[in-house]
Amino acid sequence: MKKQILISILAITAGAMSGCGKQEFAVTESSTSAAAPGSFSVPAKVDILLVEDDTGSINEAYPQIASQMPALLTSLESKGWDYHFATIPLTHIITTNEVLTSKHDPNWGSQWTAPWPGASMSSITGAVPAAFFRTPGTYTEFVDQNDINNSLTGHEPGFLTIRHALKYRMGSNGFMRSDSMLVIFVVGNGEDTSGVTFCTRSDGITGPCEDVGYPSQGTKASSFNYYKSELLKLRTSASLLKFYAAVSSYRRSNCLGGPAYAGARYMQMATALGGQSFDICSTSITASLDAMGVHLQAQKMNMRTRYLFIDQDANPDTITVTRFAGGNASQASVIPRDESRTNGWTYAGQVENVYAIDFPAEMNLSSGYAIELHGAAKLTGGDTANVTFKPAGTK
């Protein structure tokens, strides 16, 4: 979304009146502070889908995930993310009925936090329908032992399940927004077999054809490329899709309550889609979640802000925009007004559904009174800005 107002005061102060004497008003400047997505005050949108192994092989991890994930989400919100969160099982398709959100969703009511100066609840795009909205205290769709599915006889259609859920099962619950980053986080100790052809050797051993001596019949590479392509179609830019995998890095006899297979395809997808992999058998759930959060923060440092929002219409001749490089108050520089729209700011007035972030991809549809930054004037990474102005109609 946009910027977060730190100070925004229109002080129209009534002077003392005596009898029928004249009423006096003093108009003072308003001040709005804003930041690029790399700082901790701009809520870049992210939709996080947690995909949990439901084969029963990581039953020791279920309570850890359920207890630690809310802490990660709280941490992300405190660091400037506007998140949606949902969970699905890894191997069977369900309809997701719950979406957990940051406080930038209007369903929070009196606890709602405006994502940019002047924002109203009605101006928020991508709000979750009330029937699906959940808070950390009411969210119940983490996978547990009651969801275990043991009927797959060695097959694990992880990619298939993820694709189907995101393409066909998330349309009505408001989980996935068109102007957000999509994060897929797989937690399990198996290996994906979506679209993989199995062959049986003469000794009775069955496995992917490439692994049991029939490479010409194998489909591991083609099926992987298919699902990679299908996932990329879910976003307008590859930079808006990240895949993370907490899986076993090699085959083990026991890992979190069951045998583990190397999650090679999950790790391969994480590499292909700009995420990271973590060894679930040697790294704690907490450490894996923390590492994912750190990696997401690094992505935010690459984002660039095009619009600064203020909470009311301004007189353009009174606007001053000051940038603090890297958020450092000692690195202040005034951004010039530039009607040539080259390397300065122009006053856009009231705008509707513009992308506040324009790099590495367009994100965060926002509406309100805005100052547009051009060229080198745009905020990046940890840059912050302060805007002072007087309301429209004043000098």
Image: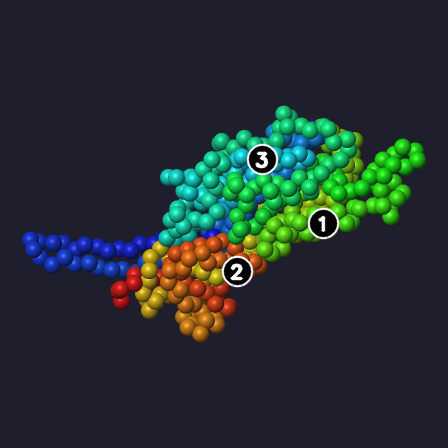
Instruction: From this view, report whether residue 346 is shown above or below residue 275.
Output: below
> Residue beneath label 3, please?
95
Give the foreground label among 3 and 2: 3
In the shown orientation, is residue 342 left or right of residue 389?
Answer: right
> In which quadrant of the rendered image does the C terminus lie?
bottom left
Q: Which label's residue is closer to the chain start, 1 or 3?
A: 3
Q: Which residue is mark 1?
A: 226
Which amino acid type is marked by label 3?
Thr
C-alpha distance separating marks 1 and 3 = 24 Å
Rendering quarter of residue 213:
top right
Q: Pick the residue in front: 115 or 213.
A: 213
Give the answer, above or below, for where 143 lies relative to 303: above
Q: Count the marks: how many? A: 3
At which x and y percent is residue 101?
49, 41
Single out the mark in the foreground, 2 or 1. 1
Q: Which residue: 70% across, 30% down?
A: 55
Location of residue 255 (image quadrant)? top right
- Residue that mark 2 sits on: 358
Is 282 left or right of 357, judged from the image as shown?
right
